Amino acid sequence: MESIDIPENVVAIGNGVFAGCANLRNFRGKYASADGRCLIIDGELVAFAPAGLTTYAVPDGVASIADWSFNDCVALTGITIADSVVLIGDYAFSECQQLASIAIPDNVTSIGDFVLSKCSGLKSATLGSGIALIGDFAFNECTGLTSIDVPANVKTINMYAFYGCTALTSVTMGNGVTTIGSNVFRKCTALTKVVLPDSVETIGDYAFGYCQALPTITIPAKVASLGDYALYGCLHLSSIYCKPTTPPDLGRSVFNGIASDAVIYVSRASLEVYKNAIYYNGCSSEVVGYDF
């Protein structure tokens, strides 16, 4: 199927209806974009005809990209998103395995669940300053992604957002992120640098689990809870700096499976309280007072 005519009596088209139609070259009739490559309903791009294209520019005036719109466009290497876009839906670009880079405009406020999941060729992703939420599994198993800067407007990074990004070496977050969800960076096995802002309050279960190359991490002063296995399996983690004056609530085995010679640095004024909490948690690492 290379072409589809949309009759005038059609009033709605479901998300993902044409996903996986690799031979589709154009739409005609109602809702078709000027170039025939998209269906746009009330400012929402709901379908894309990918055949013969390796790059594409989302038309100006599009306000949202619907769920599944570009899913599994396996030949797509580049996409330009119009500045008019404010919302990108679930699975919008998932499994676009040749997509090498993407820049999310500053007007976008939310990127959906699985939005770029399993885009194995993705090496560069620029997140716009307006994003407040990164959805579940958003960059899950983007195995070519090497670094990410999370803008300050983001408040929550949802679960599994960067799970299994095995080439990711560096993560920087702007001072606005309060919640790092469960499994967010789990199995990012090449991660060597992570900068957590002072705004972080909650670090979820397995958030950094199995980040085997990570040598050091600083837990910001506002963190009130560290989830189960939050740092479990970080085999080379040898320096942990815990800034909270009161020990955070510690989930199960938070510090287990780290380097055998690891040292946990804590506020001198809270040293004994920390020792009791950390050793009770089953950790045998040395706990040392430190002036932050």
Image (cartoon, rainbow, N blue to C red):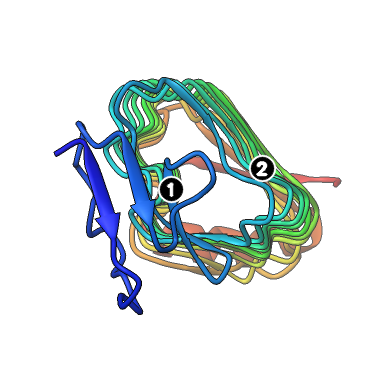
What residue sits 31% from the left and 78% below the top? 9
Label 1 crowd (10 A; few <14 / some 14-19 / many >=20): many
Q: Which residue is mark 2?
A: 127
C-alpha gap between disc 1 and disc 2? 24 Å
Classify residue 82 by image quadrant: top right
Front-most of residues 261 and 197: 197
Q: Is residue 56 left or right of residue 70?
A: right
Give the camera-side residue of 285 and 232.
232
- Label count reads 2
Question: Is label 1 or label 2 in front?
Answer: 1
Q: Is residue 95 left or right of residue 128?
A: left
- Of 200 and 165, which appears nearest the observer? 165
What is the x, y in percent for residue 167? 43, 20
Q: Position of residue 144 (x, y in %)?
A: 42, 20
Q: Residue at x 42, y 41 (%)?
A: 37
Is residue 182 in view? no
Q: Is residue 126 left or right of residue 185?
A: right
Q: Amino acid at mark 2?
A: Leu
Q: Is residue 129 visible?
A: yes
Q: Quadrant of residue 113?
A: bottom left
Q: Earlier in the sequence, mark 1 or mark 2?
A: 1
Q: Nearer the viewer, residue 205 or 249?
A: 205
Residue drawn 34% across the image and 39% down it: 26
Q: Is residue 165 above or below residue 66?
A: above
SS at badge 2? loop
Q: Is residue 165 above or below residue 197?
A: above
Indicate the amino acid at tag 1. Answer: Cys
Name the residue tied to disc 1.
38
Q: Which mark is residue 141?
A: none
Location of residue 32 in the rendering, given as x and y in whole percent from the top left corner: 44, 54
